[in-house]
Image (tube, rainbow, N blue to C red):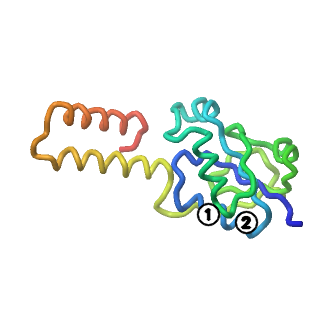
Amino acid sequence: MAERVMVDMSATLLHHGHVRLLKKAAELGTVVVALTTDDELKKAKGYNPELSYDERREILESLRYVSEVVPSGFIIDENFMDSHNCRMLIHGDDNMNHVRKERLVIFPRTDGISSSELREKVLDALVDLNLSNKNTNSSEKIAYILIETIKKEFKLE
């Protein structure tokens, strides 16, 4: 029986970088995803995720690399890992968790993608869509202003 390994993530917008990390983790053992709850994301990052915990969990559970998804805080520790019978924590190189290095496997992040970058691409696409429409009405102008405000709020500029 393969040992259980934990991957902690928020997966607010699931992308190929997440999938690559989960694939690498699956090569090391049975993958348990510690998925940050909505309340914890609000506290840690200051906003509600685009997808709810249940939606994110459903997506992750559908991936062949994931055996189990458990709710977690934004930061996890070895007690949390032990409570789920996981020997190792696997994370990208932005790890902030309080886990001894002998229980930690760090993989480099996938270049050119993150949930923040994906958010910015979506907002840019919406801006382009609004600006390219020659028959821009007032609601589209308001949408453009809202998009620019959101970009500033999330520091996406």
User: How much space separates mark 2 and mark 1, taking CA atoms?
Assistant: 16 Å
- In the image, residue 32 above or below residue 127: below
Mark 2 or 1: in front is 2
Q: Position of residue 114 (x, y in %)?
A: 50, 53
- In the image, residue 103 above or below residue 48: below
Looking at the image, residue 137 sits to the left or right of residue 81; the answer is left
Could you classify mark 2 by the number of other residues whose Cα lies within 10 Å: few (under 14), some (14-19), or many (20 or more)?
many
The quarter in which the N terminus is drawn is bottom right
The quarter in which the C terminus is drawn is top left
Q: Residue at x 61, y 63 (%)?
A: 108
- In the image, residue 155 above or below residue 26: above
Looking at the image, residue 94 sits to the left or right of residue 131; the answer is right
Rendered image: mark on residue 108: 1
Q: Residue furthest left?
A: 135
Label 2 SS: helix
Label 1 SS: loop
Q: Position of residue 118 (x, y in %)?
A: 44, 52
Rendered image: mark on residue 26: 2
Residue type at the position of mark 2: Ala
Q: Residue at x 62, y 48 (%)?
A: 58
Q: Residue at x 84, y 47 (%)?
A: 84
Residue 146 position by quadrant? top left
Q: Position of residue 38 (x, y in %)?
A: 61, 34
Residue 152 position by quadrant? top left
Q: Residue furthest bottom?
A: 27
Q: Position of residue 68 (x, y in %)?
A: 75, 52
Q: Residue at x 72, y 39 (%)?
A: 72
